[in-house]
């Protein structure tokens, strides 16, 4: 729980676009020091210039969050410039779809590298720094927010690689919350589970590294990309709305952050099936035409 953000330091991965950029904008308005982290140099430069123009102290770092050494250097740079951060937003993410057996090893390495390892590195590097600051100062308050997805609570078809990465982030963050409860009442954690929000994630292949090249896309992957583009692009809740929910949750020490609470009915039916030992329910029960269209398109 952080009740006053002024003069505090925020580390925001994926800070050049989407939720990261919108959180940076709110942070700048609240008088925070900002560490902007992104793999895309032009987006990072633009975001940094905007925040500096707002009067914020900014450290902009081009970092691949999946790279352990690069993240270790980032943590050292943050500590040297601002000391221990107060708000860490492990938010960088990429999307990928297709039938789960059709994903290549490179697909798995890329998506898990950013979506899961990026969060792992943020947690393992910044949590000890924050706990040390808490021990040294009874007034210190710290909060870590990890970006998962509603795909971390559901298992929709044709996007298994993404689901796996986001389920892992939910489990990691719930455990982080429980572990922090054991050792500190000054540092806490939340998980962000957005549904379809226009952020740019559906075009994340723009930042795919050359050493993990994509193969020729399969039919299911092309269908998954088109569905993702449509769903994300037509989202009615904006990234700015979600960023405000993130700050509200940090201020209130609220763990689960949802962009679309109305989607939780699907989570409930999944959990009930688990408890009852039933087979996984139809994810398209509410919109059968979607499931029918996908089956028709993929049925050989």
Image (cartoon, helix red, strand yellow):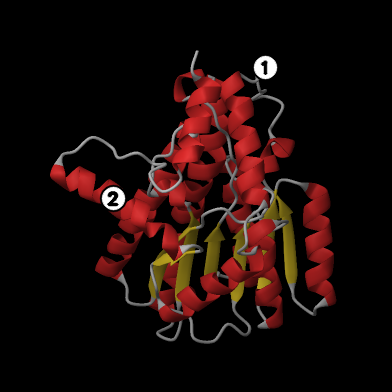
Q: Is residue 196 or residue 54 the one in the foreground?
A: 196
- Where is residue 277 drawn, in percent x and y? 15, 39
Which residue corresponds to mark 1? 216
Nearest the eye: 289 or 78: 289
The answer to whether 29 appears left or right of 247 in the picture is right
Tell me if residue 285 comes above or below residue 136 in the rendering.
above
**Left or right side of 210 for 247:** left
Front residue of 275 and 167: 275
Q: Secondary structure at mark 2?
A: helix
Q: How far across and how far down the image is residue 229, in percent?
A: 66, 42
**Any mark on residue 45, and which?**
none
Q: Which residue is mark 2?
A: 269
* SS at mark 1 in the image: loop
* Residue at the spot 47% in from the left edge and 75% down from the top edge: 250
Disc nearest the viewer among 2 and 1: 2
Q: Quadrant of the N terminus?
A: bottom left
Residue 208 lies left or right of residue 150; in this view the side is right
The 10 Å Cα crowd at callout 1, few under 14, some 14 to 19, many 20 or more, is: few
In the rendered image, residue 176, in percent from the top left (x then y), is placed at 35, 58
Residue most extreme to the top: 300
Instruction: Classify 10 Å Cα crowding around label 2: few (below 14), some (14-19), many (20 and above).
Output: some
Q: Nearer the viewer, residue 160 or 143?
A: 160
Asked whether residue 86 is in view, the answer is no
């Amino acid at each position: 729980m952080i009740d006053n953000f002024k003069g505090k330091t925020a580390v925001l991965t994926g800070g050049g676009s989407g939720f990261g950029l919108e959180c940076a904008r709110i942070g700048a308005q609240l008088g925070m020091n900002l560490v902007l982290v992104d793999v895309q140099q032009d987006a990072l430069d633009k975001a940094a210039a905007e925040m500096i123009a707002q009067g914020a102290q900014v450290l902009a770092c081009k970092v691949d969050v999946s790279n352990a050494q690069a993240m270790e250097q980032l943590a050292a740079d943050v500590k040297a410039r601002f000391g221990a951060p107060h708000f860490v937003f492990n938010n960088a993410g990429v999307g990928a779809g297709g039938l789960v057996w059709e994903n290549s090893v490179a697909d798995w390495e890329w998506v898990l590298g950013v979506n899961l390892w990026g969060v792992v590195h943020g947690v393992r590097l910044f949590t000890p720094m924050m706990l040390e600051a808490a021990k040294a100062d009874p007034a210190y308050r710290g909060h870590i927010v990890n970006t998962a997805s509603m795909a971390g609570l559901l298992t929709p078809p044709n996007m298994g690689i993404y689901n796996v990465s986001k389920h892992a982030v939910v489990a990691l963050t719930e455990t982080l919350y429980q572990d922090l409860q054991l050792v500190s009442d000054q540092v806490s954690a939340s998980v962000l589970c957005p549904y379809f929000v226009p952020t740019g994630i559906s075009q994340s292949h723009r930042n795919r590294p050359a050493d993990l090249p994509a193969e020729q896309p399969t039919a299911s992957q092309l269908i998954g990309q088109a569905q993702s583009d449509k769903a994300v692009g037509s989202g009615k809740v904006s990234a700015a709305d979600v960023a405000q929910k993130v700050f509200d949750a940090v201020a209130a020490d609220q763990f689960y952050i949802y962009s679309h609470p109305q989607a939780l009915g699907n989570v409930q039916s999944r959990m009930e099936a688990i408890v009852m030992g039933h087979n996984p329910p139809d994810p398209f029960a509410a919109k059968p035409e979607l499931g029918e269209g996908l089956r028709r398109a993929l049925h050989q």
